[in-house]
């Protein structure tokens, strides 16, 4: 009689384990299904980059950031411009007509930062009369791309471009 009880207890234990295993398997499958749905939803809701909104940033977010003074700086130095050779430092193009003098006064002084700021300024002028939401998105993208903490290899240039962006904010987003 006791052996029969033990066998029944063992059978009951095995049944519980089987049920628990099935429950865990169903939970795992449900979790995988939810994750796949989330990924599909994210793919659907990703907005394509608007033309004319792309910044001219330093390193992209996907690239690992190099620490200042690291060996990576030796292999990817910032572009240098030679001040004495003709044709290497072209004179900056005339600023767009609709840009106020207060914004032009804040353009960076270093040649590399000036070239980057000029590119941004041309895009700003082209978008100045566009949709406010698109301008705000473009401005935020430039701010994130040119923040000095995001560009340790070009910190001085990034700082000057970022300060220029801050000076132009009132005009561009008005």
Image (cartoon, rainbow, N blue to C red):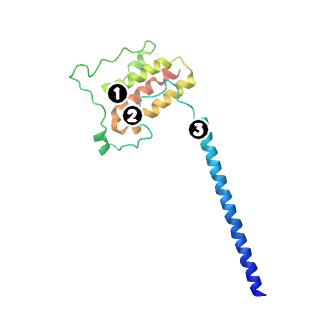
Pick the quarter of the image with the N terminus.
Answer: bottom right
Q: Give the number of the disc on residue 59.
A: none
Is residue 47 shown left or right of residue 16?
Answer: left
Q: Is residue 127 left or right of residue 85?
A: right
Answer whether residue 55 is visible to the viewer in this image: yes
Q: Of label 3 and label 2, which has the lower sequence position?
A: 3
Disc 2: which residue: 58
Determine crowd level at label 3: few under 14, some 14-19, many 20+ residues with C-alpha closer than 10 A: few
Please name the residue shown 27% across and 27% down the image: 81
Q: Where is residue 110 in the image (x, y as percent from the top left)?
A: 31, 26
Is residue 106 among what the camera can see?
Answer: no
Check contact, mark 1 vs mark 2: CB within 8 A.
no
**Mark 1 — residue?**
113
For disc 3, the marked residue is 43
Mark closest to the chain's N terminus, 3 or 1: 3
Disc 1 element: helix
Say which of marks 1 and 2 sits in front: 2
Q: Say which residue appears at 46% left-offset and 21% top-offset.
A: 124
Asked whether the beta carbons under mark 3 and mark 2 sit within 8 Å of each other, the answer is no
Give whichever of discs 1 and 2 has the lower sequence position.
2
Residue 117 position within the rendered picture, expressed as x and y whole percent measured from the top left = 39, 24
Left or right: 145 in relation to 81: right
Element under disc 3: helix
């Amino acid at each position: 009689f006791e052996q029969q009880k033990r066998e029944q207890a063992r059978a009951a234990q095995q049944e519980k384990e089987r049920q628990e295993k099935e429950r865990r398997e169903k939970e795992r499958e449900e979790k995988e299904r939810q994750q796949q749905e989330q990924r599909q939803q994210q793919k659907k809701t990703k907005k394509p980059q608007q033309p004319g909104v792309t910044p001219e940033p330093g390193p992209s977010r996907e690239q690992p950031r190099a620490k200042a003074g690291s060996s990576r700086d030796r292999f990817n130095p910032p572009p240098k411009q030679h001040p004495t050779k003709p044709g290497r430092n072209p004179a900056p193009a005339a600023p767009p007509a609709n840009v106020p003098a207060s914004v032009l006064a804040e353009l960076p002084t270093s040649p590399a930062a000036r070239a980057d700021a000029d590119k941004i300024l041309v895009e700003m002028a082209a978008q100045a009369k566009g949709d406010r939401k698109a301008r705000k998105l473009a401005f935020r993208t430039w701010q994130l791309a040119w923040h000095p903490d995001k560009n340790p290899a070009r910190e001085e240039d990034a700082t000057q471009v970022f300060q220029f962006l801050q000076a132009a904010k009132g005009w561009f987003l008005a």
